[in-house]
Amino acid sequence: MTFVYNFPFFCILLCMAAGIFTSILKQRTAKILTFAVSAVVFILSALTLRLTLQLDEAYPFMMGHFPAPWGNEIRIGRLEALMATGFSAVILISLIAGMWHTHSFVSEQKTNLYCIMIDLALAAVLVLIYTNDLFTVYVFIEIMTIASCALVVVRQNGHTLVAITRYMIMHLFGSGLLLMGIAMLYGITGHLLMMPLQEAVGNIVKTGEHLGPLTVVIALITAGLAIKSAMFPFHGWAPDTYAFAPPLSSAILSGIISKAYIFVLIKFFFRVIGLDVIVTQQITPFLFVCGVSGMIIGSIMAISQQDIRRMIAYSSVAQIGYIYLGLGIGTKAGVEAALFQMLVHAAVKSLLFLSTYELINVSGDHKHFRYLHGAGYRNVPAGIVFTIAAMSMVGIPFTGGFIVKLNLAISGIAIGGWVRALVLIALALSTLLNSVYFLHTVVSIYRKPTQKLDYPEVQKMPPYVAAALIVSTMLIIYLGIGSEPILRVIETGLKTFS
Amino acid sequence: MWQLLYENLEQTVAVILFGIGFSILLLQRNLIRKIIGLNIMDTAVYLFLASMGYISGKKAPIVVDGVTSAEAYINPIPAGLVLTGIVVSVSFTAIMLALTVRLYRRYHTLDMDEIAMLARGEDG
């Protein structure tokens, strides 16, 4: 039983070791190893989740030979284990559903490198979920940025190069702000581990000394992570990157990696600063306004797109807005809704990117809506999967998206005043806009083509891909019907999170 | 106010350099200048960190003459952080330069706006 305590550490180590070995393997073996690693990580994370459900408290795990105030450590609780399980499940399903067509984006000798970058991204995501040290956060955020850069630019054309250059510039700016914030926080507290930091920050708030610098630190770190997770006014890099990257990379980037940054932000809010201090320092209204404007403007931009991939990329901006709306409400209930949205959006968005690729593939590689007419008949499983994912995006009952909107509305109503009005108006408006573009897409993939177009014969989608897509669709419906236990894990996990 | 800024001269300079660095990174159109801005920004943070760990009159924390009291030495942790940070920024500079080389070979210019305009005309 005590052996299970080591599993999160094994997961991290396994991903990194696999990354090293992948470079010397044959192409086929490398792909199989990547599958195996993500499957093992998923199983180990699920076992860790089972363990943490039996424990009442989160437990720290010492990394290296030195105990807490000197050495490095990770901390494992219910919330961390739930996120690790959910994210590794999404990565596993994306790999099964997306790996078979990588050869049309990734040249043969680069396949191994592509697999290494997936392993590295998974390792970084796990570290960011579990770690308890701010400088480790910085280092692994940089590793994740490098990995995601390579995941995009592996497809060699002009669009990905330009998109990734924009991406890197914004991300480097974000990292700079984050590093400056961490340096200042170290300057005023003298700690980097989160537990002693919490104590030191508590003292600063109590005595009022260095309160000004603390506000600057919170602003710097929030801004840095907001830029990196494509929060609304800083989303400029996102649409092109997600649209032109290989579909598997888009699924991982938009589904998992942008969520990891937000999870770090939530960890910073709860474990280092404390939610009440964040609220009194007036950070939450800023996040709230950005979230609401992201929800609405992201959707309006999505409606005006002609390219289906760019439409889905812009809807990502809107969905990230929901997460920041939940954070911006500034109550525990709001953050719980945001965390649930992170899980739902990870599953739905990766599914949308992958099923869209299949629809484009059977339409002669055309991305415009008018060429996609009838694609739902040419590839039936992909059509069904896309429809259900779109329904979750709109928020139709029995899908995960509905539960998210319900919880956001409930937590907004509990506040009262202008926040209640704004939350409800924003949710209503954004649901309306979502349904405009997603239902329009669903209708157009099921519309009979007006003129007879000759689509070239393409390689048929293997049956296991259809199976993975269907399993993932069932996951979305499960998140809609059986959300109660997951919400309870999030609720109890958040109590032991700080 | 000025007195306070002068007393913390290193930190003041570091913050000013940080501002200069990120303005160059975001506002310049030339890619090489952007990379230089990135390096100025990172170096400013290292100056900030290093100046924080230094205590005047104390030695580097390497025990040579048997003095083991912590009072005799400066704080080594910021120096460790700076070293890690340097490794990160070197690898990012390398990646950005590699991207610049690729963009230049393809579009024969270093102007980001021009490159974006040329790329828009291509087929996705």
Image: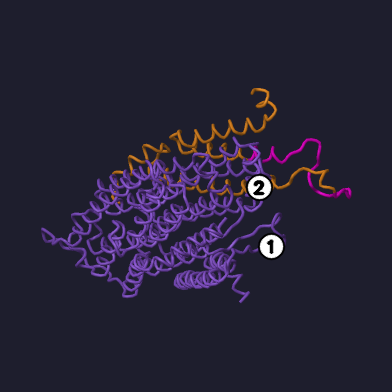
Chain colours: A purple, B orange
Which residue has dot 1 on it? A64
Residue beneath disc 2: B81
What span is colored magenta in the figure? Answer: B46-68
| Helix, strand or loop for the magenta stretch, by majority | loop
Quadrant of the image containing the C terminus of chain A: bottom right
Residue A305 pos. (x, y %): 26, 48
Q: Is residue B49 above or below residue A120?
A: above
The magenta stretch spans residue B85: no
Location of the N terminus of chain A by quadrant is bottom right
Looking at this rendering, what residue extends furthest in the bottom direction? A1
Task: Name the subunit of mark 1.
Answer: A
Q: Quadrant of residue A304?
A: top left
Residue at the spot 51% in from the left edge and 40% down from the top edge? B35
Residue A364 position in % (x across, y down): 23, 61
Q: Amino acid at mark 1?
A: Gly
Q: Amino acid at mark 2?
A: Leu
**How many dots with numbers?**
2
Q: Position of residue B99 (x, y in %)?
A: 46, 47
Left or right side of A72 for A35? left
How many neighbours does mark 1 have within 10 angstroms: few (below 14), some (14-19), or many (20 or more)? few
| Front-lying residue, A166 or B104 | A166
Secondary element at image label 1:
loop
Give percent across and percent down for residue A317: 36, 49
Is B32 situated above or below A26?
above
Q: Nearer the viewer, residue A412 or A449?
A: A412
Q: Which disc, if any, is residue B59?
A: none
Between A465 and A362, the one lying in front of the other is A465
| Residue nearer the viewer, A421 or A2 | A421
Q: Residue at x 38, y 42 (%)?
A: A417
